[in-house]
Amino acid sequence: MLAREQKKSLIDQYGTHASDTGSPEVQIALLSERIGQLTEHFKTHQKDHGSRRGLLMLVSKRRSLLDYLKKYDTERYKAVIGKLGIRK
């Protein structure tokens, strides 16, 4: 789980306005942060298969949000992947 302050800073950084929590950019940023945390978790807990399933679901959700953003607004898509360093 993300800490409240960490989540707030991500929303401030990627949101389009002050109360923006639902835009694809914010959702992708939050999912990416959780994916990074789970990846670190698996370095010490290799056999945690329940969390691995959750990680795969998070990656799938992020992928679908990125596909949506790429389909409807390629400029925003390029900006998000550039900021997060997801794709090459």
Image: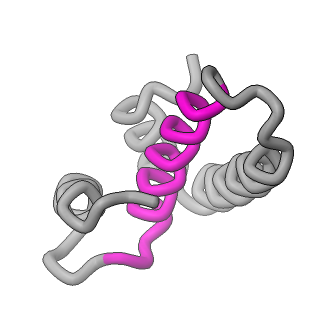
Quadrant in the picture for residue 35: top right
The question of residue 50 being in magenta is answered with: no
| Residue 15 seen from this side | no
Q: Position of residue 8 (x, y in %)?
A: 21, 65
86 or 16: nearer the viewer:
86
Q: Position of residue 48 (x, y in %)?
A: 78, 41
Q: Which residues are magenta?
A: 21-42
For the point 76% across and 27% down, which residue is it?
Answer: 46
Q: Position of residue 38 (x, y in %)?
A: 59, 40
Which of the colour schemes (rainbow, by chain, secondary structure, one colour) is used?
Answer: one colour
Residue furthest top as drawn? 88
Q: Determine whether, in the image, residue 47 is placed left or right of residue 79.
A: right
20 or 42: nearer the viewer:
42
Main SS, magenta region, reads helix
For the point 64% across and 59% down, which residue is it?
Answer: 65
Q: Is residue 41 above or below residue 29?
A: above
